[in-house]
Image: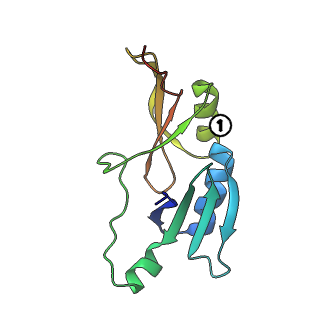
Amino acid sequence: MQFGYTILYVEDVPATIAFYEAAFGLKRRFVHEVGDFGELETGATALAFSSLRLITQLGKNPQRASADAPSFEIAFTTDDVPAAVAQAVAAGAELRHAPEQMPWGQTIAYVADLNGFLVELCTPVAAQP
């Protein structure tokens, strides 16, 4: 089995795709012509978005994201966390935690996307000796 993608439920799929392209430099893989589903290239897996409307039509009761009470986070690794934070904020992300060096050597920062999802921007975790 292989992990294929993660789907986040959002109000506006095309706007979310455009935000992730601008804020994090991701490439669009696919956006359905109706605008209820889209995917971004992220490496071995895809980050996907489905509209709240579509998932409700499928009989689910999705909850809106809240950066103040997250149930998960998305993490993107980069060698330059401050530059990634600046790009994300310039694209409309909300800074939630400025870049900080952690005791294990990783630099982390957090922003909230336009839907309220918490996004970690961080350096890769170094292998421990």
The residue tagged 1 is: 87
Image position of 48 (left or right of 55): right
Q: Residue at x 65, y 77 (%)?
A: 32
Camera-nearest residue between 43 and 100: 43
Q: Amino acid at mark 1?
A: Gln
x and y percent of residue 6 in the render? 47, 59
x and y percent of residue 51 in the render? 49, 73
Q: Residue at x 31, y 75 (%)?
A: 61
Q: Residue at x 39, y 84 (%)?
A: 58
Task: Determine whether 101 is above or below 118 in the image.
Answer: above
x and y percent of residue 59 in the render? 34, 84
Say which quarter of the image contains residue 110.
top left
Can residue 99 be seen at all in this image of the molecule?
Answer: no
Can residue 49 be seen at all in this image of the molecule?
Answer: yes
Quarter holding the C terminus is top left
Within 10 Å of disc 1 (Cα), the crowding (few <14, some 14-19, many 20+) is some
The colour scheme is rainbow
Q: Secondary structure at mark 1?
A: helix
